[in-house]
Amino acid sequence: VQELGRVNGLLTVVKATLEGVKLAVKGLVLMSAELDDVAQALLVGKVPSVWLAKSFPSLKPLASYVKEVVARCQFFHKWLTNGPPTVFWMSGFFFTHSFMTAAKQNYARKMKLAIDMVEFDFEIKDGEADCFEAPA
């Protein structure tokens, strides 16, 4: 839920600033300093600083950044539509540590264990095709 809130916050800023730049270019609204910064960043292929303020950490150029935002949205949409995935895209989270803590809490509650007794054990896989069962 927290991750989706962060993604929605980012998408809200992206949409608002893009709409603002569009209106400012048409002369329908005043081009504020923030909108000018957004327009200048877009012109040179950089991620606008106002987006990065609400974003996951990224040093990517604009095109790669947008591609990653779309991939993250698709990941969460698939999760909401089909239920929890068998494989989690760990770097797709804004704060991986929060996700890992929540997973431990959920497992501890389900198994009626103290959270301090729960540890992670990792297996590196090539992807979903390499995983035949969901984690416990």
Image: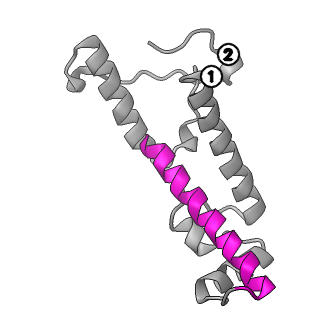
Give the quarter of the figure containing the N terminus. Answer: top left
Q: How far apart are marks 1 and 2 (CA)?
A: 6 Å
**What is the x, y in percent for residue 14?**
63, 64
Q: Quadrant of residue 75?
A: top right
Magenta span dominant secondary structure: helix
Residue 12, position in %: x, y?
57, 60
Q: What residue type is labelled 1?
A: Lys
Residue most toward the front?
28
Query: Residue at horizontal 66%, vertical 51%?
Result: 69
Q: Name the residue under label 1.
A: 125
Q: What residue type is labelled 2?
A: Asp
- Residue 91 against residue 41 in the figure, above or below: above
Left or right: where does residue 54 sit relative to residue 28? left
Label 2 Cα neighbours within 10 Å, binned few <14 / some 14-19 / many ≥20:
few
Q: Position of residue 83 (x, y in %)?
A: 55, 22
* Left or right of 117 in this view: 89: right
Q: Is the Cβ of the residue at disc 1 closer than 8 Å to that at disc 2?
A: yes
Q: Residue at x 49, y 15 (%)?
A: 135
Q: Residue 58 lies in what quarter of the image?
A: bottom right
Q: Quadrant of the C terminus?
A: top left
Circle 1 Cα neighbour tier, 10 Å, few/some/many (<14 / 14–19 / ≥20)? few
Residue interval drawn in magenta: 1-28
Q: Residue 7 magenta-drawn?
A: yes
Q: Is residue 114 left or right of residue 124?
A: left
What is the number of the mark on residue 130?
Answer: 2
Q: In this view, does 100 lie above or below 83?
A: below
* Mark identifier at residue 15: none
Q: Which residue is drawn at 67% across and 24% down?
A: 127
